[in-house]
Image (spheres, rainbow, N blue to C red):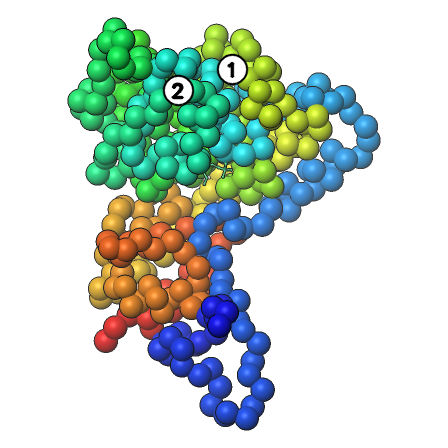
């Protein structure tokens, strides 16, 4: 039998009939909501769609030589510094590849957390395209620290091992935790003192900035060599920027972009999305909405018996440990990641998540919990 998409009112046991009358026409299956499954399940912000439409008004030079791309680069320079170099990409994975390609040669390695997206969720793309090794370091909450890095690194002159050349961290981390500016500065100093370079995966950098209540420029002052600035999870259709804060690393950036298959000919449509997010600080408004609703969900969930937070909620991801039967029940209505045996669930909010959606979800969670 095809697996049910979960028509059962919250609170009823899995498989229970959804209608009181055998003879009545059964209601159509209710789709499982993807609302809290990921921030990628959200649509596109109307201002971004409008910017794409505006960029469609006429012809324009291709491969990034157009006015919209220049505008997006200027906006990124206004946020991250006038000297930065920029390359655009369609996906976060590609942006990470372009960034890391600027830092690593095939005999070199990057240190990252074992939970890093580049290590666990990019299907080996960095290894395939860069030929470089990624070395995962276990962390308690997704965040690397100088002591963890010091303990994990090795001498660069051992010919049997790759040369440790880069540190890669995600801000926020894949567990929703956020590095303080001070810890970023400490990691950057350690990295440079050890003849290495620092990459920051900023697929959700806007959420981190809102969490820390800082401007994007604050990250530029931490000693990061190259970061990605994610648009997609912030309301874009598919647009990411690689920002070379250390512009000397960006010399072949168009070649890196081309080899990563991201030198898209109609670049203006990618650039238009990022320009829309950067204009009037829409990035901040969107990230604020996502973080606020995550915080509300975290507060509501942690007040329920049997629910504990697996990690502090510092951005737009909520990691909660819930009873397994509750996860099974809740999955009838909502899709989300859930990891046995820890029984940790991941709920994510986005720029368009509302507080009433959070309340409805918290009510379903409450009903799913065993008495
Ligand atoms: C931290 C982080 N980096 C990078 C990515 C990659 O983004 P994409 O799926 O667009 O390649 C993701 C996607 O979820 C992510 O969470």
Q: Nearer the viewer, residue 104 or 369?
A: 104
Q: Is residue 359 visible?
A: no
Q: Which mark is residue 266?
A: none
**Within 8 Å: ligand 1 and the Cβ of disc 1?**
no
Find residue 212 and report its image quarter. top left
- Which one is nearer the viewer's eye here, 339 or 283? 339
Give the crowd class for mark 1: few <14, some 14-19, many >=20 residues within 10 Å: many
In percent of width and height, residue 22 lies at 50, 92
Quadrant in which residue 115 is drawn: top left
Q: Which residue is mark 2?
A: 132
The residue shown at (60%, 26%) is 262
| Circles 2, 1 touching at the beta carbon (< 8 Å) | no
Secondary element at image label 1: loop
Q: Residue 342 in the image: x percent, y percent?
A: 24, 53
Q: Residue at x 42, y 68 (%)?
A: 332
Q: How many marks?
A: 2
Ranked by sequence position, the earlier of labels 2 and 1 is 1
Q: Residue furthest right?
A: 58
For the point 58% across and 50% down, which residue is it? 43
Per the image, the residue denoted by label 1 is 84
Q: Quadrant where the C terminus lies?
A: bottom left
Residue 104 appears left or right of 162: right
Frontmost of labels 2 and 1 is 2
Q: x, y percentage for residue 182? A: 28, 25
Q: Is residue 358 left or right of residue 257?
A: left
Point 23% across, 34% down: residue: 138
Residue 237, visible in the rendered structure: yes
Q: Write down the quadrant of residue 68 in the picture.
A: top right
**Front residue of this view, candidates 165 and 290:** 165
Answer above or below: position of 133 versus 54. Answer: above
């Amino acid at each position: 039998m095809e697996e049910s998409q979960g028509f059962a009112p919250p609170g009823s046991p899995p498989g229970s009939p959804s209608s009181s009358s055998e003879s009545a026409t059964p209601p159509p299956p209710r789709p499982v909501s993807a609302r809290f499954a990921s921030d990628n399940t959200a649509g596109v912000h109307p201002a971004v769609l409008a910017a794409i439409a505006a960029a469609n008004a006429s012809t324009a030079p291709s491969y990034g030589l157009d006015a919209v791309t220049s505008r997006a680069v200027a906006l990124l320079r206004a946020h991250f510094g006038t000297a930065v170099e920029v390359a655009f990409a369609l996906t976060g994975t590609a942006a990470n590849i372009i960034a890391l390609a600027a830092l690593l040669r095939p005999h070199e390695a990057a240190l990252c957390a074992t939970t890093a997206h580049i290590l666990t969720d990019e299907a080996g793309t960095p290894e395939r395209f860069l030929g470089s090794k990624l070395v995962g370091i276990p962390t308690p909450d997704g965040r690397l620290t100088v002591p963890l890095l010091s303990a994990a690194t090795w001498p660069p002159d051992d010919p049997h091992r790759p040369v440790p050349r880069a540190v890669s961290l995600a801000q926020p981390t894949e567990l929703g935790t956020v590095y303080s500016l001070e810890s970023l500065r400490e990691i950057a100093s350690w990295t440079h003192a050890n003849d290495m370079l620092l990459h920051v995966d900023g697929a959700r950098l806007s959420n981190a900035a809102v969490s820390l209540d800082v401007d994007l420029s604050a990250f530029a002052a931490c000693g990061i060599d190259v970061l990605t600035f994610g648009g997609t999870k912030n309301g874009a259709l598919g647009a990411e920027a690689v920002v070379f804060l250390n512009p000397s690393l960006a010399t072949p950036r168009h070649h890196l972009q081309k080899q990563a298959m991201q030198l898209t000919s109609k670049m203006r449509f990618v650039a238009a999305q990022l320009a829309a997010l950067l204009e009037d600080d829409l990035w901040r408004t969107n990230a604020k909405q996502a973080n606020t609703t995550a915080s509300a969900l975290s507060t509501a969930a942690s007040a329920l018996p049997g629910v504990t937070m697996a990690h502090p909620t510092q951005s737009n991801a909520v990691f909660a440990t819930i009873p397994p039967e509750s996860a099974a029940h809740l999955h009838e209505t909502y899709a989300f990641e859930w990891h046995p045996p820890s029984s940790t669930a991941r709920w994510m909010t986005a720029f368009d998540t509302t507080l009433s959606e959070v309340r409805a979800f918290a009510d379903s969670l409450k009903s799913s919990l065993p008495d």
